[in-house]
Image (spheres, rainbow, N blue to C red):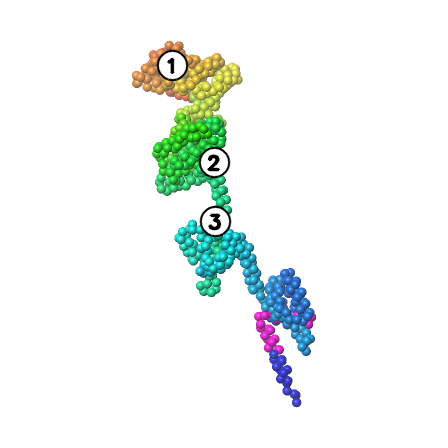
Amino acid sequence: MPSPPDSTSVFSDNLTDRLARVASITRNMVILLDEAGIIEWVNPSFEEHTGYRLKEVIGQSPRDILYGPETDPETVTRIRRQLHLGQTFEEDILNYTRAGKPYWVQTYCAPITENGDVVTGFVVIQNNISDRKHGERNLRIAASVFDRSHEAILITDRNNQILDANPAFSTITGYSRDEVLGLTPAILSSGRHSPEYYRSMWHSIEKTDHWRGEIWNRRKSGEEYIELLAISRVHLEEPGQFYHVAAFSDITALKNHAKELDRAANYDELTGLPNRQLLEERVNTARSHADRHQRALSVCYLDLDNFKNLNDRFGHALGNQALKTLAKRLSRALRSGDTVARIGGDEFILLLQNDNHEEVYQRVLATINEPLMMGEDTLTLTASLGITHYPEDNADTEGLIRHANQAMYSAKEKGRNQFHFFDPGLDEDRRKRRDQLAEISRALENDEFMLFFQPQIQISDCQLVGFEALIRWNHPARGILAPGQFLPAVENSHLEVPLGQWVLKEAIHQMNAWKEAGETLAVSINVSAQQLMDRRFADYLESYLSSHPDLNPALITLEVLESTALEDTKRASNVLARCRALGIQVALDDFGTGFSSLTYLRTLPVDTIKIDQSFILNMLEDVNDRAIVESVIFLAQRFQRPALAEGVETMAHAKALRDMGCHFAQGYGIARPMPATQVLAWASQWQKKRLAGANTDLLEPLIAGSKGI
């Protein structure tokens, strides 16, 4: 009969089974090692954490599978020593999963003994403490940041009492940490900000848990400083529990540097006035404000008269002192909201809000006129002031300044020590003229001009005596343009001489072409006063004639416009005399329309006098015009000069002129101006008709039939 089981053995088996079950279900990692530290068994939690299966680790040393590159060697050495001694120990160590991911464990290891002192193995229990370790690391980092930050950090409770302050706080404010604990940040208040400012700050914190801005505070020494402050409200898990973390930096030096940079960029170094850059910003702002409120403003350009002489006499040091004094005077003379800026040298610009009263400009000039001490001398300066009004002058900022500058130069031309208003309408005309001159210049380069020719006859026998060369513009878009559509823009411009030279060159070239075709025709060429007075005119003409030696210079007549005043009649007379010495004829054109007709007739060497068509057209109806025509013909006869009448349109005109003793005529009644290609055919037909009526009065049939020729 079998003996009953030993109760102690049964209890031991049950306990072992239960311990195995505990080891299997615990969240802790359990490792059983033999006496040499080799793995005999691991629980499922170990497998889950490490990624290693039981069959993979049996027979392995923990250091071969769990340790990695960041595992602390000293900790490993201690563990090996304690295992060798068979001691119980507890260590924190960094292990690695099978995938190579690091994790921290708290390791507790105890030896398994038999008979009380023989170590037969070890049981190792590990707990994953990665979260705790990371938290400790973050706390260390935060503590390091708190201690080493260059920004002051202040921590307060919900009642805004100071709980902690870092070393930077003491560096910036001068207060030690112990001095401020339990107090509120109000100890730093500078008193600059109103209660409303702080209420707005706390309202933002309560609403958004955050506020950021610039604030003036006071150090322990009493010195004020400006700080960039950020306040955050930090909520904890306990209901209603929160703290405030304030971080700030002293930006006083930065602000001062910014002011210095702003001053260097926007203000004149000598006078302290706004410079051009700041002025333009203010003009932009003022224009926008004027547009919104339908108001006006004035931009004034002020330039001191003859200031260079003052600098030369007294030196730049005293000159600079004078500029500083004048800058202060001008600043005092203006109202709040107005601006005076120095843009260089002795030039200032004034921006006046909603001002269009001459008294203001007189006051500005009077300010400059106040006596000025220059060393031991007392001087009185003057200035010229140019003014433009916005929005009457609806230019941009740069345009307003430029227009005021133009007006200032007009004030100087008027005699200095006065002001002049810019005229937008006149400027528009000038702009159009500049555009037209640019187009004419391109046309000259592109050879778009051409000459038309109008016949001139001898009234007594209708003999053809020559043609007048008249310029036309073959415009690529507008077609053939008459002289009145572009010559007014050329008058007194830089193009007057080049265009006149082109006419002269083209006319002579055409005369040469007709000569080669078997016809010798005389041509009259208009010459402006500016072209005639050009120092190169006579030389140019002589050079061009020498390049056409077969051309008879006597066939060329230069028509000088009498209506264009010749400022230097002596020089004009010399130039014309030189032209006549070359064999060229001279005609005084538009006689009677200028102010010096008799003077020109007496002093200028002319061969022919041309009566302006404005008198011819109405002489049959207007007794005054008829009287003028009769007087001019009489003068021509007394000075023994032939007269040529322009604007002859009817037989009645021709007969009246013949009866008055006029020698030559041209006009629509004879023929309209025609291209050079039609001249020879017209001249041939005119000659045939003239010969066919040799025994009759030729004037009536030729004049009457000319429009059909």
Using the rendered image of the protein, determine whether residue 565 is visible from the camera's viewpoint: yes
Considering only order in the chain, which callout, 2 or 3, is on the residue closer to the N terminus? Answer: 3
Mark 1 or 2, closer to the camera: 2
Along the viewing direction, whichever of 77 and 248 lies nearer the viewer: 248
Circle 2: residue type: Leu
Using the rendered image of the protein, determine whether residue 308 is visible from the camera's viewpoint: no
Please name the residue that numbered disc 1 is placed on.
598
Residue for point 67% across, 69% down: 83
Circle 1: residue type: Leu
Tag 2: Cα neighbours inside 10 Å, few (<14), some, or many (≥20)? Answer: few
Considering only order in the chain, which callout, 2 or 1, is on the residue closer to the N terminus? Answer: 2
Find residue 270 and name its label.
2
Q: Over which residues does the magenta segment extend?
A: 16-40
Circle 3: residue type: Glu
Within the magenta stretch, is there residue 462? no
Along the viewing direction, whichever of 285 and 598 lies nearer the viewer: 285
Residue 411 percent coordinates (x, y) = 40, 28
- For the C terminus, the quadrant is top left
- For the N terminus, the quadrant is bottom right
- 543 in relation to 393, above or below: above
- 46 in relation to 432, above or below: below
Residue 575 percent coordinates (x, y) = 46, 16
The part of the image, by quadrant, that contains residue 204 is bottom left
Find residue 223 and name its label.
3
Residue 239 percent coordinates (x, y) = 45, 65
Label 3 with label 2: CB-CB less than 8 Å: no
SS at mark 2 in the image: loop
- 706 in relation to 201, above or below: above
Label 1 with label 3: CB-CB less than 8 Å: no
